[in-house]
Amino acid sequence: MGFFNPGSLLCGLSLVVLVAIYLRARARPTINVSSLMLFEEIPAPVAKSRFLRLDLLFWLQALALAAMTLAAAGLFLFGRRPLGPHQVHALVFDLGAGMEATNGSRSRLDEARIAARRLISAAPAGDRFTIIGYALEAQTLLSSSAAPEEAATVLNKLKPFAVAARPAALRAALLDARGAASIDIFADRDPPNEVVQEAHPDGRVNMHRVGEPAENIAIVALDPGVPRSSAGHCVLRNFSNHSAECELQVENNGRPIVRTPLIIEPRAQAIVTFRPLAEGGLLHARISSPDALAADNDRYALAPSIAQARVLVLSPDADARDDLARIVLAINPNLVVTALDPGLYPSSSVAAERFALAILHDCSGAGVHASARMFVFPEPTLRGSKGRPPLLITGSVAAAELESRQDTGPLATPTLLGPSRVLSLPGWMQSLARGTRIDGHDSLQLAAVGRNAEGEIGVLSFDIRNHLLLDPDRLDALVLTVDTLKQILAPESVRVVATGTFVAVPTFAPAILTAPDGSTAKLQPDQWGRVRFRPLQVGRYAIKGGNREAAVYANYYDAAESDLASSRAAAEPKRILQLAAPTHNENYPKPAALGLIAGAILLLLAESALIVERAVRWGAGHV
């Protein structure tokens, strides 16, 4: 039944009985006195023992009973024994975007499958295999199966994702493979040795590099410009070691606007500009000529609308009003901006009008009619204010540092910001940036967006006075402001995101998600009516739930994964690192019942010898 069967542990009550017997026997000790009644013992009339006096005989009996109790309860110890004929092998696969690269008719992942099948075929019958994949995170796809057909089925289902493989995911995969006699990593480039060292694998680690150097051209960036105002451009990069040709096509809302052949120098970039768009909407650029990696051949962007929507900017600081108005017009010159002091707004002629966006810097949004609102350095809710505030301000700090953004991750150098409010974000808002207070380590939310019943809401928690957004040494703050404004101004039904990021779409009902490859999944909304998913393929994701429909377009680009010329194939499996001697022993549960029983018998024999010795020396009355 395993260690400490509860039923068998009831034998341990015998120790309680033993103590009770000794307490009873020693409560009224006997003494020898002169009497005509020979060989009789009578209780002492006065002397009584109030304490339990333990002797060697008691301890021998107690140890014997304890040994028999543990033997009955099934006590076992971990022992070491040589490995049997059946071992566990872990097959770890890189599922990053680079494994999709082809050199002919076969992808790098196909080569990894072939190498893995050879290992499975050459293994002795009865050996077990664990299959683990990693990209953004590690996932055990097959857990220790001895059936070759199960392993073959899992290998056939492996597919790469349009994301870059993370070292942390490889570390987690190696931790999941702990205990395996051998760990075989299949990837198109060597992992950092320190990642393998930190995982401390038990067995031998073998590296199988797959893939030949291949030519690849990637779309690095796509800027739609401003419709009817400024030109857009597309940036392409050649990762080959020689000149390469490609054909670029750009479409605006499905209508072609650019189709041009290009010759790009080795390891160089090409910038293709195109005339201002006739209208806003979805912009799609793609490389129509074939190359090794298809994931970085498509890129999407949203061009701002040409409608003359109205934007209201309120701020008690005149310089802050001007800076915000300039940024809004730089994003979309077609917008009509009205900038006012909050104290003058209630009595102005525009107080009764409705705006597409209201930007509120260090002021309240009471009395402002807008479809979307953006709070900058939001004002704390005053005592006695009516209505529920959209944001909860719990405090403020003298200065903060911008440390990470959702789209780029941690910044190489934190950006010093001014005074900031401490926000408690509601669950329906999504964080865009985080930082810390300058005089401590407390984490702060610096930017967020979300949608509730009142419309789209965004927030920047830091102050922008003293031309903070125009400071060339703090461009990250300006980029964060522009990205937040673009998300608020973007249409509700269309979004462009990067692969691997979590996307929340308000549907307020169960939704059906259709991926670019045609597969579907059912999503359940959270308590705020949002469905969440993580796009791992490039292309269009369609979400339909209730009476709402939305489209999410996912982009992929990573300089390391797209560089296919720097990786080469190894003809034979190559062991890159062996941290310890190969495992020749394994832990196994060793029952301790036989040893415990033998110990109990020895203790009982020792007790018998002690009783005989006392009887011979002092007589039977002293036993």
Image (tube, rainbow, N blue to C red):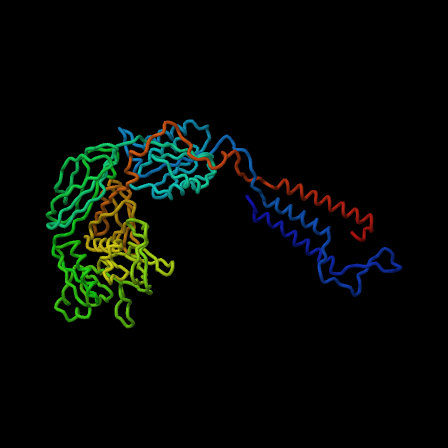
Q: Is 331 placed above or below 189 here?
A: below
Rendered position, 174 above or below 402: above
Pinpoint residue 103: horizontal percent, then vertical percent: 27, 30
Residue furthest out toward the right: 36
Q: Is residue 188 above or below residue 447?
A: above
How many badges with numbers are in the image? 0
Quadrant containing the N terminus is top right
Q: Position of residue 510 (x, y in %)?
A: 27, 50
- In the drawing, does residue 362 fall left or right of residue 3? left
- Position of residue 200 relative to residue 440, above or below, is above
Q: Nearer the viewer, residue 335 or 271?
A: 271
Q: Nearer the viewer, residue 606 or 546?
A: 606
Please state if 213 lies on the left or on the right of 257 as rendered: right
Q: Where residue 412 sits: x, y (%)? A: 32, 50
At horizontal 68% and vertical 50% (from top left) the residue drawn is 62
- Nearest the eye: 335 or 193: 193
> Which residue is drawn at the image coordinates 79% and 47% (left, top)?
613
Left/right placement of residue 124 relative to residue 43 reads: left
Q: Tell me where residue 442 sits by quadrant.
A: bottom left
x and y percentages locating residue 29 in the rendered image: 77, 59
Q: Which residue is at a point 19% across and 63% down the rendered structure image?
A: 321
Task: Identify the residue at image location x=60%, y=50%.
Answer: 10
